[in-house]
Image (spheres, rainbow, N blue to C red):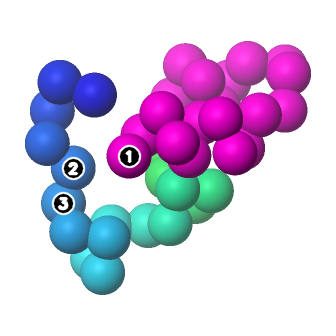
Amino acid sequence: MAQAKPPESEAKPPNQKPASPQDLRPEPAPVFDDFASI
């Protein structure tokens, strides 16, 4: 969020990104999480 993420070419896809608070949530929301990341 506050920290700039590296280019997507080098960074892992949104679904493969490192464990984040949103990903740790029990409720599955890959689409919402993806949009929030962008």
Tag 2: amino acid: Lys
Give the SS element for disc 3: loop
Give the SS element for disc 2: loop
Residue for badge 2? 5
Q: Position of residue 22 (x, y in %)?
A: 60, 24
Residue placed furthest toward the bottom: 9
Q: Nearer the viewer, mark 1 or mark 2?
A: 1
Task: Decide if residue 9 is on the left or right side of residue 7.
Answer: right
Tag 1: amino acid: Ile
Q: CA distance from mark 1 to mark 3?
A: 12 Å
Q: Residue at x 56, y 46 (%)?
A: 34
Tag 2: Cα neighbours inside 10 Å, few (<14), some, or many (≥20)? few
Viewer-proximal residue, 16 or 7? 7
The answer to whether residue 19 of the structure is visible from this angle is: no
Marks 3 and 2: in contact by CB < 8 Å? Answer: yes
Q: Is residue 13 magenta?
A: no
Tag 3: Cα neighbours inside 10 Å, few (<14), some, or many (≥20)? few
Q: CA distance from mark 1 to mark 2?
A: 10 Å
- Place residue 2 in its image quadrant: top left
Residue segment shown in magenta? 20-38
Residue for badge 3? 6
Q: Residue at x 52, y 56 (%)?
A: 14
Q: Residue at x 48, y 33 (%)?
A: 36
Residue for badge 1? 38
Q: CA distance from mark 2 to mark 3?
A: 4 Å
Q: Position of residue 12 (x, y in %)?
A: 44, 67
Residue placed furthest toward the right: 27
Q: Earlier in the sequence, mark 1 or mark 3?
A: 3
